[in-house]
Amino acid sequence: MNEKQPIFVTKPYLPPLEEFLPYLEQIWESRILTNNGPFHQQLEEKLCEYLGVKYISLFANGTLALVTAMQALGLKGEVITTPFSFVATTHALWWNNITPVFADIEPDTFTLDPAKIEAAITPRTTAILPVHVYGYPCRVARIQEIAHKHGLKVFYDAAHAFGATYKGQSMCSFGDMSILSFHATKVFNTFEGGAIVCHTAEMKEHIDNLKNFGFRGETTVVEPGINAKMNEFQAALGLVQLNHIETAIGKRKDIANSYRQRLSGIPGIRCLADMSGVKHNYSYFPILVDETSYGRSRDALYSALREKNIFARRYFYPLISSFQPYSALASADVQYLETAHKTAANILCLPIFTDMTDGMVQEVISCI
Ligand code: T4K
């Protein structure tokens, strides 16, 4: 038996407990547990400041934010999206009775390839749903041009992109709206949680109605909404986490740089470089394993790491398009998704988290 503590792909960051306790005391005192309470309101304000955006609506999790974003935009028919993401991206379409149309990704950033989007547009297409995978920006300008030309909405799954910026702008400020995830495994967590960023007060009101059963006021229901509200415990944790976010991203950056430096001499292991004009958040640390020059497959490396109690993850393998609910779609055919398939076969996300020690990083590197 291996006695060593496991090193998981991530370990949620929690602030010192004493910083959270006063918030808990206030909740116990006020008995306001949910439904747009004071911490919820404060967190929306503080997040707008931190992200440099005008309107944000908090959610119980990122998946409900995705489902609601589509409702708010009134989408139907088909939506063009990437197969290289967490399955929630596509599931949210299914929950809205929308057909996902998969298009291939770019080899350098693993984001939706604009060159493949246009070919996938049909008269039924209503929107494009790209993902800023690992916090790397999609080609937002080009995607906007295509959307404009064809009269489509664009909404970004920015679940990985909290705290990341592109050309000085928060990565969740592009398109018609963006969704965020504050799940335990994310750079910024509220245990579970999520948000929608949008651009007008009217749209925020619409989204806020939708996440609260469609209520506007006490006695009027304006649309068939759902319950997707963030509670006061989650919001309180968010307020405390926000004080630590820049330190957390800084620590992750140091870990990413150590990996890059020390893995650079290993043939067949490719790390993603930082992109110019981007402030990265280092939410994941993906490597690509080239079996021929490394001498082992990605899966062999994944298993060898597990034997040493190191739990790297194959995000995102299998592709969403390979999962049973979607594999029969015409757009799921391998011939259209060559880069995505190649990437999914060779990708491995190494452990990275705020409290990761240099010793742990060294352990992972030695094993590789
Ligand atoms: N869009 C994108 C692009 C996403 O990546 C996600 C979620 C969403 C949308 C949907 O957002 P949410 O509805 O989740 O807010 C995890 C997360 O559950 C999921 O949030 C995330 N993406 C996805 C990429 O990863 P799993 O099944 O891989 O997580 P799990 O439980 O295996 O956790 C990974 C490791 O983290 C564990 O081995 C140990 C460690 N861990 C995990 C948790 C939950 C802890 O140490 N403590 C914990 O509490 O899905």
Image (cartoon, rainbow, N blue to C red):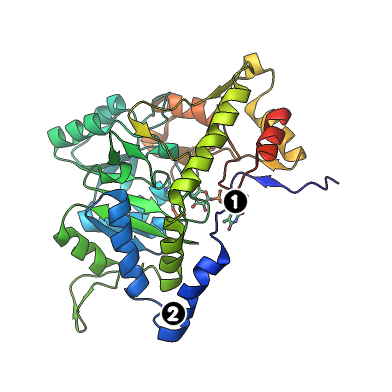
Q: Position of residue 228 (x, y in %)?
A: 36, 67
Disc 1 residue type (three-letter): Lys
Foreground residue, 345 or 5?
A: 5
Q: Position of residue 86 (x, y in %)?
A: 46, 45
Which mark is first along the chain, 2 or 1?
Answer: 1
Residue that carries the numbered disc 1 in the rendered image: 11
Kindly tell me whether mark 1's CB lies below 8 Å from ligand 1.
Answer: yes
Residue at horizontal 69 percent and vertical 33 percent from the top: 362
Residue at horizontal 59 percent and vertical 30 percent from the top: 258
Q: For mark 2, give the secondary structure.
A: helix
Disc 2 residue type (three-letter): Gln
Foreground residue, 109 or 187?
A: 187
The mark closer to the camera, 1 or 2, is 2
Drawn side of residue 290 relative to residue 169, left or right: right
Q: Position of residue 358 (x, y in %)?
A: 65, 38
Q: Residues within 10 Å of mark 2 (few under 14, many from 20)?
A: few
Kindly tell me whether mark 2's CB lies below 8 Å from ligand 1.
Answer: no
Quarter holding the C terminus is top right
Drawn side of residue 72 relative to residue 188, left or right: left
Question: Is residue 316 at least partly visible in the picture?
Answer: no
Residue that carries the numbered disc 2 in the rendered image: 26
Q: For mark 1, give the secondary structure.
A: loop
Badge 1 vs badge 2, beta-carbon distance below 8 Å: no
Query: How much space separates mark 1 and mark 2, taking CA atoms?
Result: 28 Å
Q: Residue 114 has which mark?
A: none
Q: Position of residue 192 (x, y in %)?
A: 47, 61
Residue at horizontal 48 percent and vertical 79 percent from the top: 25
Residue at horizontal 49 percent and vertical 26 percent from the top: 272
**Figure quadrant of residue 33:** bottom left
User: Against 188, is 16 above or below?
Assistant: below
User: Against 204, is 22 above or below?
Assistant: below
User: Against 138, is 54 above or below?
Assistant: below
